[in-house]
Image: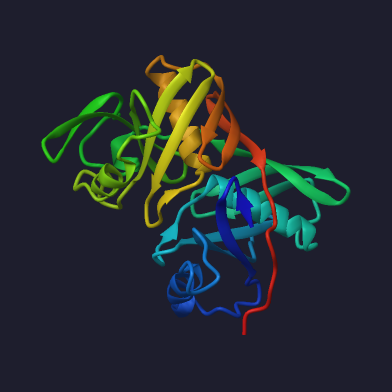
Amino acid sequence: MHGLGNDYIVIDNRKATIKEENISAIAKKLCERRFSVGADGLILVSNSAKADIKMRIFNLDGSEAEMCGNGIRCFSKYCYENNIVKKKEQLIETIAGLKKTKLTIKDKTVTHVYVDLGVPIFEKTRIPMQGQGNCINEELIVDGEPFRITCLSIGNPHCVIFVNSIDCYPVKIFGPKIENHPNFPNRINVVFVEVVEEDILKVRVWERGCGETLACGTGACAAVIAGNVVGKTKNKVKVCLLGGELKIEYNKTVLLKGPVEKVFEGRLF
């Protein structure tokens, strides 16, 4: 499945067919492009005692992520269309807490999913990153070059950097250096943003454990939140990513809406 090209392998694991000790290795094996199915990550459907269903998501390097905006939209569509949670509004358990989704359905097919990602976290210790207080428009030195960064968590951590022109920006050079910077003990997603207008952003994201992806839902939200906090954007913004567009609304909580598609299905032996 994919949301704007941000693609995932989704597996119903409610019967724990994939054992805990094997998940990381299977994620790395299945997500390897050209030599396997290929994806940005593996999503497992699990039982929940506190919500309709539980989502677990693993990056292509085998590490487990707290949350994913595009991933949870794929997950929600999968659960509805496979009669796991036959609700237009779903409550989903994640490592980052309970998340609510709302589905747009046409001819029994989920076309768009809207997700409430909750209230962003700015406190450095909770992102986490080194230091105290909030990280808003602070300087970060990488290989002797200064960057102005705003960091926050929306269930998973993001470092937002505004640039003049995104199309030719060296994301693949600075993305991994910032992701693995010692300021971020659990690594971090790096969001590069060009402000086109106050309600239009162009965004490229270097995702922790994945590299640059065609889209990142939480990264798009982080761009809008950071832009709003530093006075660059409005509350309702269209975010243009390599894989397409997302609509973001930020007013204390952050709301994300975008299309989601199933590419194919198969059986793993």
Farthest residue, direction bottom: 269
Task: Name the residue at 47% across, 29% down.
Answer: 202
- Location of the C terminus by quadrant is bottom right
Residue 268 in view (yes/no): yes
- Location of the N terminus by quadrant is bottom right
Residue 120 in view (yes/no): no
Farthest residue, direction right: 107
Task: Name the residue at 59% across, 34% down.
Answer: 245
Q: Is residue 192 above or below residue 189?
A: above
Task: Name the residue at 50% across, 61% down.
Answer: 41
Horizontal side of residue 115 vs 134, given as left or right: right
Residue 170: quarter of image = top left
Residue 262: quarter of image = bottom right
Measured as percent of width and height from the top left, residue 227 is found at: 42, 22
Residue 140: quarter of image = top left
Measured as percent of width and height from the top left, residue 79 is found at: 72, 59
Farthest residue, direction front: 168
